[in-house]
Image: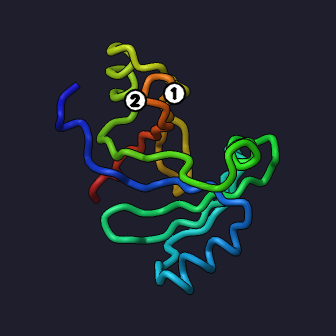
Amino acid sequence: MTEGRWHGIDHLGIAVADLAAAKDVFTRLLGFRVVEEEEVREQKVRVVKLATGNADLELLESTDPDGPIGRFVAKRGPGIHHVTLRVKDVAATLRELEAAGIKLIDREPRIGAGGKRIAFLHPQSTAGILIELCEEAEEG
């Protein structure tokens, strides 16, 4: 794995029980700016993305108690859910990491919030931390 593969932290995913209340805290009280709001049906989640400077924050509210965020909040309460790292090519990075012995949740990239290609690494292989890979947008 080359050091050049990693292109920084894209965002921190924060699981919340009440999206409206969390959005209010981060915007009105802390002054962050909303850059995107959407529902990602496949992941059973509503997302509010906040600009913070170098890396964004994603507030994540479950649309289904049995979805990943719903189960996370029920078990652990609100808090940091995952760290997302920017990479040039998600598919190539997955192949390289799997060959190096990293356990994958996603063997192929899928579409996540903002239409970005993403994939998750299993926390069993990443010191207990859920890591998402996010493909950098093509420069146009």
Residue positioned 56% across, 56% down in the render:
14
In front here: 111 or 63? 63
Q: Up-down: is 73 above or below 118? A: below
Q: How is the image coloured?
A: rainbow
Q: Is residue 87 above or below residue 103?
A: below
Quadrant containing the C terminus in the rendered view: bottom left
Residue 79 visible, this angle: yes
Marks 1 and 2 in Cβ contact (< 8 Å): no
- Mark 1 to mark 2 CA distance (whole Å): 16 Å
- In percent of the image, x 44 and y 46: which residue is there? 83
Mark 2 crowdedness (10 Å alpha carbons): few <14, some 14-19, many ≥20? some
Q: Name which of mark 1 and mark 2 comes first in the sequence.
A: 2
Mark identifier at residue 17:
none
Residue located at (26% from left, 41% from top): 6
Question: Nearer the observer, disc 1 or disc 2?
Answer: 1
Q: Is residue 111 left or right of residue 91?
A: right
Residue 91's disc is: 2
Asked if residue 44 lies left or right of residue 88, the reply is right
Q: Position of residue 102 (x, y in %)?
A: 41, 20
**In the image as oriented, which residue stretches furthest toward the front?**
76
In which quarter of the view is residue 125 placed? top left
- Helix, strand or loop at disc 1? loop
Looking at the picture, how far across and down is residue 32, in whole percent? 47, 78
Element at label 2: helix
Counting from the top left corner in percent of width and height, residue 41 is at: 72, 50
Kind of residue at badge 1: His
> Can residue 41 be seen in the rendering of this structure?
no
Where's residue 25, x and y in %?
59, 78
Q: Dividing the image into 4 quarters, which one contains the N terminus?
A: top left
Residue hosting label 1? 122
Q: Amino acid at mark 2?
A: Ala
The residue drawn where x is 42% and y is 29% is 126
